[in-house]
């Protein structure tokens, strides 16, 4: 660590200073510091869910906003996501134990024929950063894999990614199959990938096209909220 | 001995490269998800047709069908043991087409990214990346390409690794990056940063530049960023023919031949020497580009306003080279430096 000057003792900060520092440390991708701060907050009696929503998620929101706005790029976002993971490794079992409310569950993968997964990985990380539970199918997924996973795992969202103009039409195959099974209404379907656009998302019957990982998170949050309101 | 591309550049003040590979192969029936590189052996007649299309349309350079021909990409099709064979086959077909052209046509061995993120952010080590690029370069060399053509790179480390692969194979090379995220590469590289990065490489490319990305306007903005650095190294502009649109289950690019002809001349005015297309660019587009480059006089260096007016607006207000891009001011005074 190269922090000679301004070396700072996290445990000496009060709660609000510490939370503010965590947001900066997430921004800077400092994994060890995030893990330490999470432990400190737990020791101070914070509920795991509050640590998630009031520090980590807010911090990742800033990262997501700056990625969307062209201030941060993929390397920085990956480092932030890794720092987030450092905190989540501690929190995840505790969240389950304490029966914390869930943001939602998403199955995600690149579609059949498409092996380009950097964008998909970013979305998965940012979604996790926002508190969603992610089942990552990896690359090259046939329709059945998305649909069976969504059914068996009780997902709320199906996320499909394609980088190639030649693979993007397969997204429609998945959606059509869902419709045939009478299950289209059970899931929020989000699509993304460099060559896609909103017009394409509409044409194939997705709920939304997401321009980047940050927008995917915003879209997922608002659609989940709308769903809850309907119920 | 100088390479064929350097020789041709010394004789001409602009060169036309080719257009899209994927677009053409899908029109010949390549199935979505199949590795195009397998056709170098399984359907060589289609690859001949692909190359011939570019040559007949007037291209001075065409790229081999080997974009995904590295071990990391071919592994996804369980063909990682066929790197040498598939690259050599593609190059041999190219050599044959070029040698029959009746004029000098450069066969450029296409080398695309590994698709992996490099250390320290990702998992691919520099030495592993070099090894993959070197392996592909040897296959292309054995098949007789004139130069290597590294393209669609987004990370500086990967660009350097590919350059090192070329050096190990003893090949001259050209190398482009794809600027598709707020005017930068996905990894945040600006056009001016790339121009300077290129000069720091021990075996620098014969030419460098941009390919693919968003639309032709963005690509020209990137070219202006390169030429502003005035390194004197030839600049490559290989932009997409517009933006992909989806109609009745098919994708087509909305850039017309007329638009691509305007783009080609503006790219030359912006400082590019090697001009071509990328996704969506067909021989029809190439013909229009060639004719425009041959018949229209050179013009002023285009302004951003002129580009936007002729070709359409940019995908982002800034490309990171003008210090006008968005920034974040953080209030916390305790911020650590990493």
Image (cartoon, coloured by chain):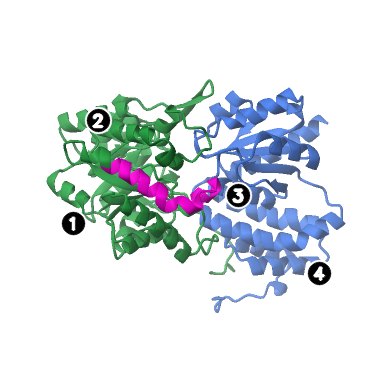
- Mark nearest the camera among 4 and 2 is 2
Q: Is residue A169 above or below residue B179?
A: above
Which chain contains the residue that carries disc 2?
B
Q: Are marks 4 and 1 on the same chain?
A: no
- Quarter the N terminus of chain A occupies: bottom right
Asked whether, in this view, residue A145 is left or right of residue B253, the answer is right
Report which residue position mark 2 lands on. Answer: B56
Q: Earlier in the sequence, mark 4 or mark 3?
A: 4
Element type at marker 4? helix
Q: Is residue B119 above or below residue B276?
A: below
Q: Nearer the viewer, residue A181 or A92?
A: A181
Give the residue at x 72% y 73%. A11
Q: Residue furthest right?
A: A98
What kind of element bears circle 3?
helix
Query: Residue at coordinates 73% horizontally, 62% vertically from top-left?
Result: A89
Which residue is painted at 68% across and 72% down in the image? A10
Quarter of the image where one finds residue A193: top right
Q: Nearer the viewer, mark 4 or mark 1?
A: 1
> Magenta part of the protein: which range?
B72-95
Disc 1 target residue: B2
Q: Label 1, label 3: how many angstroms apart (C-alpha)?
A: 43 Å
Chain in blue?
A: A
| Most distant residue in the top direction | B248
């Amino acid at each position: 660590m190269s922090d000679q000057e301004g070396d700072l003792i996290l445990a000496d900060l009060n709660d609000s200073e510490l939370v503010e520092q965590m947001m900066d440390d997430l921004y800077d991708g400092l994994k060890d510091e995030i893990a330490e701060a999470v432990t400190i907050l737990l020791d101070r009696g914070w509920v795991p869910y509050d640590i998630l929503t009031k520090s980590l998620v807010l911090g990742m929101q800033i990262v997501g906003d700056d990625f969307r706005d062209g201030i941060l790029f993929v390397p920085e976002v990956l480092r932030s996501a890794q720092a987030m993971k450092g905190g989540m490794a501690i929190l995840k079992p505790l969240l389950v134990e304490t029966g914390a409310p869930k943001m939602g569950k998403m199955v995600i993968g690149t579609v059949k024929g498409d092996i380009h997964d950097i964008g998909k990985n970013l979305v998965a990380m940012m979604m996790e950063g926002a508190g969603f539970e992610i089942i990552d199918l990896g690359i090259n997924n046939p329709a059945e894999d998305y649909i069976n996973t969504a059914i068996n795992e009780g997902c709320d969202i199906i996320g499909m990614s394609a980088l190639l103009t030649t693979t993007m039409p397969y997204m429609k195959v998945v959606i059509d199959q869902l419709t045939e099974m009478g299950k289209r209404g059970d899931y929020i379907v989000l699509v993304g990938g460099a060559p896609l656009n909103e017009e394409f998302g509409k044409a194939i019957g997705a709920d939304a096209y997401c321009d980047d990982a940050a927008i995917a998170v915003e879209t997922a949050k608002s659609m989940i909220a709308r769903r809850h309101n309907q119920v | 001995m100088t390479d064929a591309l350097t020789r041709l550049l010394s004789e001409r003040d602009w060169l036309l490269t080719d257009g899209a590979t994927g677009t053409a192969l899908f029109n010949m029936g390549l199935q979505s998800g199949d590795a195009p590189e397998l056709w170098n052996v399984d359907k060589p007649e289609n690859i001949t047709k692909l190359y011939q299309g570019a040559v007949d349309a007037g291209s001075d350079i065409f790229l081999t069908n080997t974009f995904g021909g590295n071990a990391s990409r071919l592994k996804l099709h369980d063909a990682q043991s066929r790197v040498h064979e598939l690259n050599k086959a593609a190059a041999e077909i190219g050599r044959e087409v070029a040698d029959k052209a009746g004029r000098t046509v450069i066969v450029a061995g296409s080398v695309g990214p590994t698709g992996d993120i490099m250390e320290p952010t990702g998992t691919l080590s520099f030495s592993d990346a070099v090894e993959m690029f070197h392996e592909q370069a040897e296959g292309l060399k054995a098949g007789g390409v004139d130069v290597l053509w590294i393209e669609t790179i987004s990370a500086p480390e990967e660009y350097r690794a590919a350059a090192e692969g070329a050096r190990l194979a003893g090949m001259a090379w050209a190398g482009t990056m794809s600027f598709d995220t707020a005017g930068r590469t996905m990894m945040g590289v600006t056009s001016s940063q790339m121009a300077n990065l290129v000069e720091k490489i021990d075996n620098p490319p014969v030419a460098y530049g941009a390919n693919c990305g968003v639309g032709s306007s963005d690509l020209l903005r990137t070219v202006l960023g390169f030429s502003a650095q005035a390194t004197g190294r030839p600049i490559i502009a290989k932009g997409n023919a517009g933006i992909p649109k989806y109609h009745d289950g098919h994708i087509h690019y909305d850039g017309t031949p007329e638009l691509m002809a305007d783009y080609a001349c503006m790219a030359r005015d912006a400082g590019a020497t090697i001009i071509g297309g990328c996704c969506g660019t067909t021989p029809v587009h190439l013909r229009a580009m060639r004719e425009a480059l041959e018949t229209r006089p050179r013009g002023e260096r285009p302004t951003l306003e002129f580009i936007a007016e002729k070709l359409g607006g940019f995908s982002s207000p800034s490309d990171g080279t003008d210090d006008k891009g968005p920034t974040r001011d953080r209030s916390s005074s305790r911020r650590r430096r990493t």
